[in-house]
Amino acid sequence: MIAMAAYDLSDVDTYCDIKDPVFDVIMAGAAQWAARTGWMPPAADA
């Protein structure tokens, strides 16, 4: 595993290349949890 400090995160493309797969894993787990528990997001304020 390479530490995030090894990357130039001021470059938006590099930041997104690293962040997107992590975000996908987190969201997949959240979606599974929501399905198991019946959780729904609250209604929008708009």
Image (cartoon, rainbow, N blue to C red):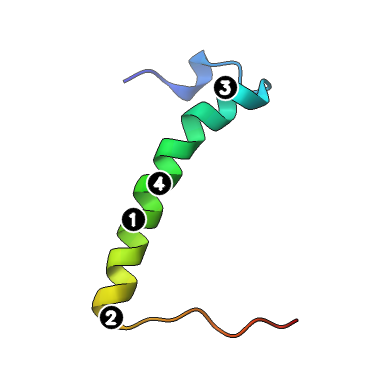
Q: Earlier in the sequence, mark 1 or mark 3?
A: 3
Residue bearing the label numbered 2:
37
Instruction: Look at the picture and state if 11 lies above or below 27.
Output: above
Q: Position of residue 29 (x, y in %)?
A: 31, 58
Number of numbered discs on residues: 4
Tag of residue 13: none
- Residue drawn at point x = 24 percent, y = 76 percent: 36
Q: Identify the amino acid type marked 4.
A: Asp
SS assignment at label 1: helix
Q: Look at 56% across and 32% down and name the residue there.
A: 16
Residue type, label 3: Thr
Quadrant location of the N terminus in the rendered image: top left
Distance of mark 4 from mark 1, alpha carbons?
6 Å
Name the kind of residue labelled 1 in the image: Ala
In the picture, the quarter occupied by the C terminus is bottom right
Which SS class for mark 2?
helix
Earlier in the chain: of badge 3 and badge 2, it is 3
Q: Is residue 6 left or right of residue 27?
A: right
Callout 1: few (<14), some (14-19), or many (20+) C-alpha neighbours within 10 Å?
A: few
- Specify whether 33 is left or right of 18: left
Name the residue that disc number 1 marks: 28
Q: Which mark is residue 24?
A: 4
The mark nearer the N terminus, 1 or 2, is: 1
Question: Eyeballing the image, is 34 above or below 17?
Answer: below
Query: Residue most toward the left?
Result: 36
* Left or right of 23 on screen, residue 35: left
- In the depicted view, which residue is nearer to us: 34 or 1? 34
Give the residue number, with chain letter if any, for mark 3.
Answer: 14
Q: Residues within 10 Å of mark 3 (few under 14, many from 20)?
A: few
Query: Do the numbered discs 4 and 1 sit on residues whose CB atoms are within 8 Å?
Result: yes
